[in-house]
Image (cartoon, rainbow, N blue to C red):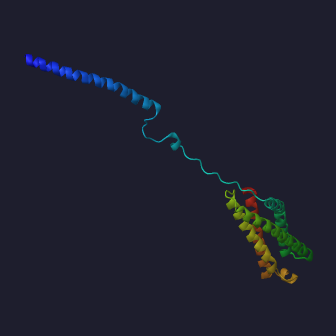
Amino acid sequence: MRSLLVTGLLLGALVLPARHAAAQDDGPLQAALANAFSSGALTVPGSSDAADKQSPAPRVAAFEYSEGYRTRAKIHKYASFATLPLFATEFVLGSSLYDTPTDSKKTAHIAIGSSIIGLYAVQGVTGVMNLLEGRQDPNPKGKKLRLTHSILMLASGAGFAITPMVAPGGRDQLEFGSSSASTHRAVAFTSIGIGTAGYLLMLFGGK
């Protein structure tokens, strides 16, 4: 019995100092860990707010059109005002000349037709040059619309260029309604129709 008591006292003397020392050591360690977490030195790996944000899209460089482009655009615009009046006049004259041909009607018909060809020459040069310059714009507006307008007007202009080639050669041919007169009329009216479509497309669909 006495030996057990002595053994217990010895064990208590050994264990209690060790537990006391461990308790003292835990205090500074816990304080150091708390300071580290509060200061942000120890963080849990994760995605930051900056990484979550999408990077902004790259800016598209602005394209500066030349002064010549602006001048040609004005000429093209103001000349186009004569398109429909010339078409309407030539349509009426051509129909009247086909039904009841006279020398005065033929002269007026030729004059109006020449004016339309001249108008197409101006419109073709200014339009094609601006279309080529506009291709350099990295962010063009209405590109498909302008391209469609250009194709229609060039097709119409080609038709008007062919029209005099299929015109009847004399008054007798007109009076008897030769196939040459019919072809001339068909090509002219088709060209007027295509040109009107191209004009109205640009008038109501864009600038």
Q: Quadrant of residue 132?
A: bottom right
Q: Seen from this angle, which residue lies furthest left? A: 1
Residue lying at the far right of the rendered structure: 104
Residue 178 appears left or right of 136: right
| The quarter of the displayed image where residue 148 is located | bottom right
Q: Is residue 48 left or right of residue 91?
A: left
Q: Quadrant of the N terminus?
A: top left
Residue that appears at 79% across and 81% down: 180
| Closer to us: 79 or 89 | 79
| Place of residue 198 in the rendered image (x, y in percent of width and height, measured from the top left) | 74, 64
Asked where in the image residue 170 lies, by quadrant, the reply is bottom right
Query: Residue at left 92%, top 74%?
Result: 104
Task: List x then y, in percent, for residue 60.
Answer: 65, 53
Q: How many numbered marks are there?
A: 0
Look at the image and tell me whether residue 61 can be seen: yes
- Give above or below for 200 relative to 109: above
Quarter that holds the C terminus: bottom right
Which residue is more in the foreground, 149 or 23?
A: 23
Residue 197 in sight in this render: no
| Residue at (79, 73) in percent of width and height | 160
Q: In this orientation, which residue lies closer to the viewer: 121 or 59?
A: 59
- Rendered position, 62 above or below 177: above
Where residue 136 appears, x then y in whole percent?
70, 62
Q: Residue at x 33, y 26 (%)?
A: 26
Would residue 160 appear left or right of 5 to someone viewing this image? right
104 left or right, relative to 150: right
Q: Position of residue 182 (x, y in %)?
A: 78, 78
